[in-house]
Amino acid sequence: MTKPIAIIGAASFVGARLVERAELLEDIPIVPIVRSPRSQGRLARFGTRLALGDAGDAASLVPLLRGCGMVVNLTLADDRRILGDVQAMYTACQEAQVPLFVHMSSGEVFGRAEEPELSDDSVADSPHWMEYAHGKRAAEAWLRSQPDGPVKVVILRPGLVWGPGAGWLVDPAKALLDGTAYLFNEGRGICNLIHVDNLMAHLLQLADSPHPSSGVFNISDAETHTWAEFYRAIAHEVRVDPSTVRMLPESAFRESRLHAVRQKLFNVAPARAVKRRMTGDTKGRIKQALRDRLSPPISEPQLIVPEPDVSKQIWWLQGTARKLPSTKFAEHYPGLQLKPFDELMTAAGKWLRFAGFENSDRS
C-alpha cells in the first residue's frame, strides 16, 4: 500500500510500536493521530509529526484521513465512549473516502471463552462484568450492522498484547521479582496472548492487500500457553525460581470492601481519565491509603512479608477455558508470518534485563 495508514490512538502501546516501526524501517507512510498535545510525550523520541484529532469528533478527523488507504482504531478511551467513538471514526472514513477501517476489538468480548463452539463469526452475548467488554461488544454489533459499502470494515480481536514495555510482560516480571506473583488453579487456565509484533503483522497484511474485504477475525500468537507456562517463561528471563509463584485456589478471590470502594471511586468518567495518566507508583500509594483507611491499625510491630494484591481482573483472566480459534485470518491472508513465542520471549527477556528487571542474586 502506497497510501498512508492513519493511526487513531497513536500514543497507545500498539500505536507507539507502529510509529516506531515506521520510523525505523521507513517502509510505510503513516498519519499518527492523538487526541491531545499531552499524548505526544510517548512519541516525542521518534521525531514524528503528529496530528491532533478527537476520535469522537468526525469533523476533526476527516481532513486528517483524506488520502489514506487504511484507518486503524487503537484508541484507549473511557469505556463508555467506545461505541460513540467508533461511530464517529466510521463516519469520518466515509466522508474522507477511506477504503478500509480496521477496528481493534478484544478477545475479552467472549469472557472466559467457556462455550466450546466459539468461532471468529460468533456473536458475544454471554454475561460479563467488565464495562470494557460491553463497550467492545456494542461497537462490534454496530459495525456489523452497517451495509457492506465502499468502506470495508475489518474487526480484529486480539488477546492479551505483550512485548517490551507492555503491562502483560512488565507486571508479571515485577511480581516475580518482589515475591507477589500468584496463579489460580495452578495456572492451568489458558493465556490468550499475542505479541505486539505479531499483531502488527496482521495490520501490515491488511495494508498490503489490494482488495481487502470486510470480516471479523480472532488473532493470537500461533502457540497455546497456560498462565503457568507464561509465568515460567518470564521467570526464566528475570532469573527467578518459578516455584516461588504462589498457587491460589479459586476460593482465594473474594470481592472485598476495599475493592468495592475502589470500583466506585474509579468507575466515573473523570476518575478514569485521571487514572490513565497516573504512574504506577501513584496508583500504588492511593491503593495503600485506601487499605490504611479500611483496615484496623497495627498495634504491635510485625514482620512485613510481601503479599499479592489479588485483583478481580487477574482472577477472571486466569480462569480462561480455551484459546480462541485464530486460523481464519491466515486463510484469507496467506502471507501472514508470525514470529515464534520462544524467539519473542528471548528478545523480551533482553529488554527486561536492560530495564532492570532481574534477580541480582542469580544474575
Image: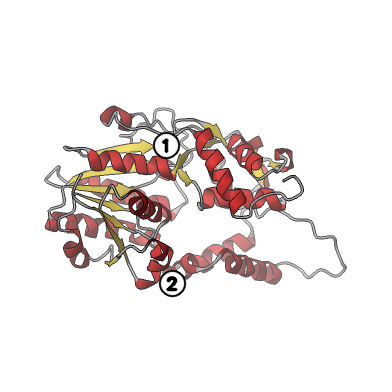
Q: Quadrant of residue 20?
A: bottom left
In terms of secondary structure, where does tag 1 sit?
Answer: loop
Q: Name, please, the residue furthest toward the front.
A: 25
Q: Name, please, the residue furthest toward the right.
A: 300
Mark 2, mark 1: which one is toward the viewer? Answer: 1
Q: Is residue 132 left or right of residue 244?
A: left
From the viewer's side, name the closer residue of 268 and 189: 189
Label 1 packing within 10 angstroms: few (<14), some (14-19), many (20+): many
Q: How many marks?
A: 2
Task: Residue 333: give x, y in percent of width and height.
Answer: 27, 31
Q: Quadrant of residue 155?
A: top left
Residue type, label 1: Ser
Up the image or down, 133 lies above or below 292; here it is above
Q: How is colour applied across the structure in the image?
A: secondary structure
Residue shown at 64%/37% (left/top)? 232
Q: CA distance from mark 2 to mark 1?
A: 33 Å
Q: Is residue 109 left or right of residue 49?
A: right
Up the image or down, 77 lies above or below 140; here it is below
Disc 2 target residue: 270
Task: Residue 172: give x, y in percent of width and height.
Answer: 61, 48
Task: Residue 19: give x, y in percent of width and height.
Answer: 35, 55
Q: Quadrant of the N terminus?
A: top left
Label 2 packing within 10 angstroms: few (<14), some (14-19), many (20+): few
Residue type, label 2: Pro
Residue shown at 35%/72% (left/top)? 37
Q: Is residue 154 left or right of residue 44?
A: left
Disc 1 target residue: 220
In terms of secondary structure, where does tag 2 sit?
Answer: helix
Task: Residue 122: give x, y in percent of width and height.
Answer: 33, 35
Up the image or down, 335 lies above or below 294; here it is above
